[in-house]
Amino acid sequence: MSKVKEPEATYIVDKKGNKKAVVLPIETYDKLLEDLKDLSVVASRKEEPRISWSEIKKRLKKDDRI
């Protein structure tokens, strides 16, 4: 199992040292937004009918795509 790299982050803390906000590099933020959008699509399609891999291959062959 591969480890997920922790993003570089700078935390904004209150007087007691409690984390209140975070600052991320823009590249990290953009990747997080992309992942969030992908997960949203997956969740919205959860109830759609599934197609087996063999059926997908059959359809692609029929359409001369593989």
Image: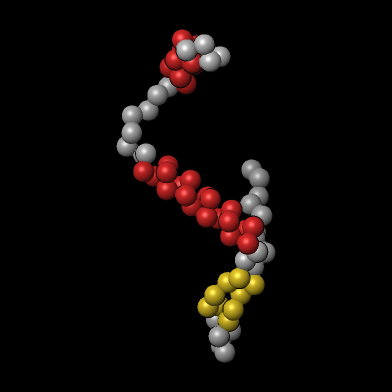
Q: Is residue 66 above or below residue 18?
A: above
3 or 60, which is in the foreground? 60
Q: Quadrant of the C terminus?
A: top right
Residue positioned 46% across, 47% down in the render: 39
14 or 56, which is in the foreground? 56
Q: Is residue 30 visible?
A: yes
Q: Quadrant of the N terminus?
A: top right
- Residue 59 falls left or right of residue 27: left
Residue 53 location (% of width, % of height): 47, 21
Q: Is residue 30 above or below residue 11?
A: above
Q: Is residue 54 visible?
A: no
Residue 21 location (% of width, % of height): 54, 75
Q: How many circles with numbers are drawn on the protein?
A: 0
Residue positioned 36% across, 39% down in the render: 46
Residue 23 location (% of width, % of height): 61, 70
43 or 16, which is in the foreground? 43
